[in-house]
Amino acid sequence: MTATRFRQRKLSTKAALQVIDDSQIDVTDDDTRHIATIESGVERTEEIEHHLQAAISAANAAALGTKVKAAFIPTPDASKVIPNYENLYRKVYSHPHSYIRFSSTVEDTSGNLYCIDEEDDEYITQYNSKKSQGTQCSEDNFEEVISEYEMLTALKQPFLGLSEDENLPIHLMTYEEMEEAAFESDSKLGEKAHAKDLYTWWEQRRTKRRGKPLMPILKFEQGQIDKDDGDPYVCFRRREHRPARKTRRTDAQSIDKLKRLRLDMERVRSLAKCVQLREDNKKDNQGWEAKVYTFRYKVKKYKRDFKIDDNDDDLLVNKPRKRVVEPPPAPVPKPPVRHDFKPPEADLVQLEDLHKLRVQNIEQVVIAKRKERQFNNAGWNDQTVVAFQKPPITPPPDTQQSFRQVDTYFARQLLSPPPSASPSLSPSSPNPRSTGPLQPRITFQTSAPPQTKRKREEDDNGDPMRFRMRSSRNNRVFIDRRGKRLNDKDREQIDERILDRFAFDHDDSDEEFEGFSGSTKYNREKALLFSANLFLQQVMPQRRHDHLTQSINSPATSHLTPSTPAAPHPPTPITQATT
Amino acid sequence: MVARDGSQEPTAEKEVITGFATIATLAIGVKAWVEKDGEPRKAEILSKTTRKGEPVFYVHYQDFNKRLDEWVAASRIDISREVEFPVPEKPAPPKKEQSYPNLKNQKKDKKPPRDSIASTPDPTAGPSTPSASAARSLKRNRVTFEAEHASPQSFAATPAPDEDGIDLVETPAGNVVSAPQTDPTIGNNGEIEGFSKEKEIEKLRTSGSMTQSAHEVARVRNLSKLQIGKFEVETWYFSPYPAELTECDVVYICEFCLSYFGEERRYQRHRMKCELFHPPGNEIYRDENVSFYEIDGRRQRTWCRNLCLLSKCFLDHKTLYYDVDPFLFYCMTSRDEYGCHLIGYFSKEKESAENYNVACILTLPQYQRLGYGRLLIAFSYELSKREGKLGSPEKPLSDLGLLGYRAFWQEVIVDLLVEVRENKGEISVDEIAARLAMTANDVVHTLQNLNMIKYFKGQHVICLTAGVIAQREALLEKQKVKGKRTIDSSLLKWKPPVFNAAAKTWNW
């Protein structure tokens, strides 16, 4: 033996091994001690058993090519064949052509589970000897009844006969109790022949067996773990319960399902009740009709007897009486009580909530949009606001500031504005900003009240009228109005169309209506703007005081908008005029 | 019990208390020389009772399988030789000489061991004895898998060898393997034993195994004969049929629904009503000889329980501790005009954590040695092939199971190797395993056992030895004459069943 012998590689299961014959190999060269021996898999203490060793040895010897007697392990006798097999088993089976698929259980296929024994045979013979031919108890009948008793007892008294105390009295159900139990469990015990007579026999046998079932049953665990564990006859224990992982969600789901199921069931029940009621009524109705018929028959008879000759209309035709049929109030299923004692609709989504949510969402969107716009406008001057103002050092903080209160007092003087007034505009100038100061101007006298005062006024419900003037491309001038709603009295007097017109009279209209350029709303709005334009171009330079003052003084135009002169005219012609 | 004897023998030698006994003082736990098949064998008395006024003893022969345990008359016990008394828990004080020939003849009932040594000088040793014997008898190794004798038919014709048989053949070293988990000292310690038992139950609970720890009562066979269909069969081991049935001479088993009856009259009545003609499941395989049925333990609880009770009569280590729900049962039947007669079955976990493809496997004794065991094993591997898994039977094996599996493995592996030798000439262990749906471990075990792995010219080779080839040829010859039982995979109509979580849980 050289040292290399002992340094052989491990046997790899992945390496391809050559398959060769004995003859190709030098047997003396063999040494496989390095391969770890694999356990046979037999319990060690049994592995040394005599017969097994003999058999293994024989097999090994055979594998080595030695001629030996093969050994086998002796087993107890199993060769005896019974003589009466034919009596017990019938030659009635034929295997179907296709593979069998079968799911009936032993219980399904065994008929009555109780089987008669010799004691029963004796009793039946004795019992039947007292009966006449037709009323005798058959074996099947007997088994049926006893099975029923056994089944009901197992159901109602599952722990009967488990007590090991010999002195404890056995309380079996009486026949009456048995009948009751049978009724509960839908069994037909009472209808079975001889049921009552066989009770005494069953009771007698069961008492003799100390309450145990008449047919021996397997011993199952009885909850006394220590005792059960040591008892080899206790078998087929339940496996450990592995609770499924529960989440609140699955809980809620199953509760919902159960609730729904419960409601469905209640509905079915009430439906069934209604059906029953209806059928009962029908039955009553039949009775009444029969009575009516007999009475009519009598009437007819009397008529004939007394020779009353009239037609039979009142007998043949049922005069429809107006019946007030009250449908039977369907039993209202009780609302299921929740486990947390909240009303059952607590989970439901309320319409109010939805509305609230909607309003909230809208507000949020508005705020977000506004913020976005402010962000985008940062560092820019809104020229549409301040175009014709002397550029302030800092732009007004809010567009609202460019609105100024205009009292009618000032409005009257509009046509003779003080020279200091601003803003100024020149309708003819293409670039009002650069050329503005040089052009002849129209000025509005506006009051620019201090900030604080304005604030307060805004808070008032009075909502004074305010105006803003803006100039735009093509020398358009806008006068925006704000505040002063119509009161109800005014509203009555104003023509509906005029009222309608003002609906669109609000600022930043040209941006907002971009999306609707094709719509009539848009057109109308545009018309208004143009009308204002027109007014300024036409009226202002010519100083038509009378017209304007007139319109201002009229109640319908007390809001003083630039469009008032155009108010009596439909907007479309004006649009045409400007285009 | 063999388990104890085997593990203790090396160390317990010095503790053995020997002495002479009379028939009357032969108590449970005592080991005496009993005549078996014409020769004396050492046997442990497991139970004692009286029949027709004569005492009879239930004995377990040392180094014989439990299935050969039997009731013997007093005349077969050689009381002229010394007997061994059970070792008390504490080291026994002085040596106990049992030489009281005129002790009162107590023939009634099982005699507690205490009686036999009550006259010893040390009174403390007496009471402790029963507990010691009880504790030791609890000693049981890990649960095992049990299989029936499935040795090839070539072995079947030869007579059983007598004791000399072992001398006829050379025993190559390295085949008997020690199980390292066996601790010989545990036997004497009740506490450790109890603990390991608990652990065992814990293991059963979680693993879904079908094996069982033995119990004092369970050591004694409780039924003597079963009548199954046409056959009358002696039982091998304890089975937890209702205890009342143990009083019956014969227990009658309905061949189709496997229901059990103590009285013949009841059995006859049942047979008139029973409408079952085959195992109550789906037929998944059929050839001209046999049909296989697949039965779900959860759906056919009664039938599967009945099957387990029956098979427990022939499987030592099978457990009926827990219910049958997590198992599928594959039942092999033969058909005739009476119905489908159950020949054997194997059970299989619905989901095996250790990739076992068989839990318990049994050919009913009346059908043994006809090649059916090989067929069952072949079928179990056929299923594994269909599943695309490598399978192995649940370990450890029983004696008959080991022989059956080894024979099967040898046959299929050698067949494959012969084919390889003619074609490619090379194959790896993993490839063999994959082709046969066996685990690589089982392949190596078989090759090693047959002495086929050699180291030659610096590398491992598989050597088809002359002996192996000769065995194969003999087998082929035999099959040519008698025909061979095989599984034709094209006749298997089966898809691996898929279970949802609910069907796999073990609760009811």
Image: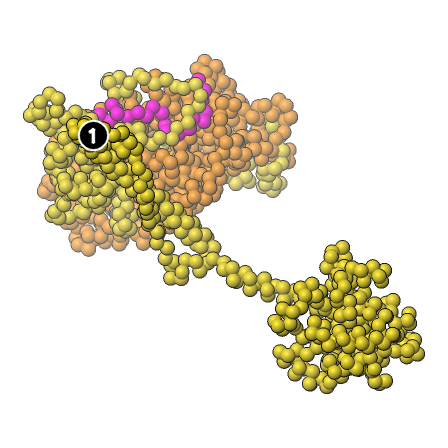
Chain colours: A yellow, B orange
Q: Is residue A86 visible?
A: yes
The residue wearing badge 1 is A308
Horizontally, residue A149 falls left or right of residue B239, namely: left
Task: Give the residue displayed 75% in from the left and 67% down from the top.
Answer: A567
Residue at 44% from the left image edge and 60% from the top image edge: A346
What span is in magenta? B269-288
Q: Determine which quarter of the picture holds residue B45.
A: top left
- B379 is within the stretch colored magenta: no
| A439 left or right, relative to A317 | right
Locate residue B383, reporting x and y percent.
49, 31
In depth, the one of A279 and B306 nearer the eye is: A279
Mark 1: secondary structure: loop
Quarter containing the C terminus of chain A: bottom right
**Position above or below: B126 against A17:** below
Locate the N terminus of chain A by quadrant.
top right
Between A249 and B288, the one lying in front of the other is: A249
Residue B310 visible to the viewer: no
In this rendering, the answer to whether B431 lies above or below A89 is: below
Q: Nearer the viewer, residue A90 or A13?
A: A90
Q: Is residue A531 left or right of residue A292?
A: right
Residue in the image at 28% along x and 40% along y = A281
Q: Is residue B278 magenta?
A: yes
Q: Residues within 10 Å of mark 1 (few under 14, many from 20)?
A: few
